[in-house]
Amino acid sequence: MTLSPKRSPGAKVEALFDAFAKRVEDGGFRSSCPAGTVCLDLDSEVEALRGAVAASLASYVSVIARHFRFRDPSRVQPFARLLVTAIEGAYICARANRSSAPYREAGTWLAEFARRESTG
């Protein structure tokens, strides 16, 4: 499991981003997040979907946040939102460049942050 309790916080982040990197590689750089894809294409005719997309992304944040413990607990939710933001942005960059490097780079930097903020 990517976010296994047996992993350190930094290792969890690296594993999460490695999993997404592998997903886009295995999909020939054609895959992306369904919620992100729908949201990018929203216009006034499908504005009603925005709430559903927002709820989907919020659920991703909630799942991720449960796996981190920081010295300052108020930083966990914003960190989880940052991870989701980086994942969504990396989908775009990975597809555009046909490279998983955006995931690996973001994972490395964000893992370092998780290590510094973590309680253990």
Image (cartoon, rainbow, N blue to C red):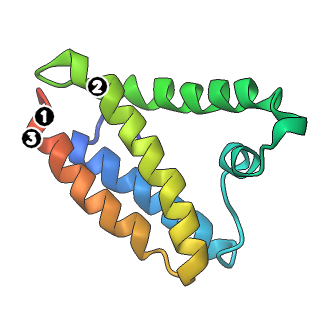
Direction from residue 38 to residue 75 in the image, left or right: left
Amino acid type at mark 2? Val
Q: Who's the residue at 39% across and 44% down the image?
A: 83
Cβ atoms at labels 3 and 1 below 8 Å apart: yes
What residue does disc 3 label?
Answer: 116
> Among all residues in the image, which is located at the extreme right?
45
Residue 8 in view: no
Of 1 and 89, nearer the camera is: 89
Q: Who's the residue at 17% across and 45% down the image?
A: 113
User: Badge 3 local density, few (<14 within 10 Å), some, or many (20+)?
Assistant: some
**How many badges with numbers are in the image?**
3
Residue 40 in view: yes
- Which of the 4 image quarters holds residue 5? top left
Q: Secondary structure at mark 2?
A: helix
| Residue 50, x across and y down, in percent | 73, 31
| Residue 120, x across and y down, in percent | 12, 30
**Pointer 2 or 1: first along the chain:** 2
Residue 117, numbered label: 1
Q: Who's the residue at 17% across and 25% down the image?
A: 70
What residue does disc 2 label?
Answer: 76
